[in-house]
Image (cartoon, grey):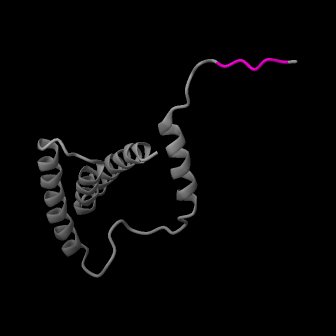
Amino acid sequence: MTETKTTGRRKDPTTAVLAEVKAERKLLDEDKPLGGGLRPERARLYYRREADRWADIATARALAGRGGWDGELLAATFAALAEPDAAAAKRGLVQAAALAVAAAQGAE
């Protein structure tokens, strides 16, 4: 009879969530620009207003001890979509992705 050794190390929950994200990403085979539509500049203005609104909501909730991932995630996502600079938009999307992973881990 053989024994199975365990090292006592637990699997990193972020790794598990990122594996799920990777699988979902494979299903999205379309290559699209970040902003679509006929007037992306108008969309960016809308996203900026929404980013500010959700940032205010997230702050108010946090001050009241009632914070959640939703407000922070929406504020970060809208802020990234509002960016006209591609590099800044990418940094914002990476931040939003980190928030989404944290929220997904918390939802387990």
Q: Along the line of sight, which residue is nearer the eye, 32 or 6?
A: 6
Residue 86's place in the image compared with 42, above or below, is: above
Q: Which image quadrant for residue 16? A: top right
Residue 44's place in the image compared with 68, above or below, is: below
Query: Left or right of 24: which side holds 71?
Result: left
Q: Along the line of sight, which residue is nearer the eye, 19 or 40?
A: 19
**Which residue does the image show at 18% across and 57% down from the upper left?**
54
Q: Position of residue 65 (x, y in %)?
A: 17, 41
**Which residue does the image show at 51% across and 69% down from the upper left?**
30
Quadrant that contains the N terminus: top right
Q: Which image quadrant for residue 2? A: top right
Q: Along the line of sight, which residue is nearer the eye, 93 or 105?
A: 105
Query: Left or right of 56: which side holds 36?
Result: right
**Which residue does the image show at 16% across and 69% down from the upper left?**
45
Q: Position of residue 29 (x, y in %)?
A: 55, 66
Please give the range of residues in magenta: 2-6
In the image, residue 4 lies in the stretch drawn in magenta: yes
In the image, residue 79 lies in the stretch drawn in magenta: no
